[in-house]
Every structure is written in C-alpha cells, then in structure tokens.
Amino acid sequence: MTMQAVSIKIPDTIAEYAVVEDEKDMLIRNAMILFPYIKNDTISHGKAAELLGIHKMDLIALYGSLGIPYFDQTKEELQSDVEVLKKLRSKIA
C-alpha cells in the first residue's frame, strides 16, 4: 500500500502522540481516523477495512480490542429486532 504524508492541525499537547512509527500503532491510528465515517454511515466496515488493507473481520476485532463494539444496539433494541424477525418469519412460513 502506498502512503502519503498529510498535514493536520492538532493541539500542541497531543502532537507527540500523533506521530507513530510502529505498524500496529499506525493501523490503530488510521482505523480511528476512519471510525467516525463508519459511525455516521459514510463508509462501511468493509470499505474501511479495504482502505486500510486488512480484512473486515480483522478491523472488527481491532475495534473490539479498543472497546468499540461492532453492534451498538441495546438489549431492548436487539430484542425488538428479534421479535420483528419472528413475526416476518411466521408470515412467510
């Protein structure tokens, strides 16, 4: 994968943390740059993984290791979705 240097404005107090040389740290930083675009549905996990040059499941696992869940539904929302699917399934059968 080719790399390009970019210039961003950040507070002086965090500048030392923005420059990383380790490949894993670079992957984490770049994944975190993409995360807001996943969250607001601009890009998918699959597209973000493609941009990062990794598999989608590896990206999901990376976010998970950082405490960012793949599914962000509450238990109640999940249960509601399950109930809707059960009703739809009963209408099809």
Image (spheres, helix red, strand yellow):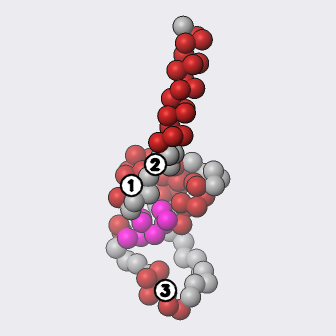
- Name which residue type carries label 1: Gly
**The residue stretch that appears in magenta:** 25-32
Nearest the viewer among 21 and 29 is 29
The residue that label 1 is drawn on is 64
> Is disc 2 in contact with disc 3, using a CB cutoff of under 8 Å?
no
Residue named by callout 2: 70
Residue 76 in percent (x, y) is at 51, 40
Q: Residue at x 59, y 18 (%)?
A: 88
* Mark 3, residue position: 14
Say which of marks 2 and 3 sits in front.
2
- Neighbours of disc 3 within 10 Å: few (<14), some (14-19), many (20+): few
Q: CA distance from mark 2 to mark 3?
A: 28 Å
Kindly report the distance in space between the C-alpha atoms of the residues bearing marks 1 and 2: 7 Å
Instruction: Please report contact status of discs 1 and 2: CB closer than 8 Å, yes or no.
Output: yes
Q: Main secondary structure of the magenta part?
A: helix
Residue type at mark 3?
Ile
- Comes first in the chain, label 1 or label 3: 3
Residue under the point 40% across and 46% down: 57
Q: Residues within 10 Å of mark 1 (few under 14, many from 20)?
A: few
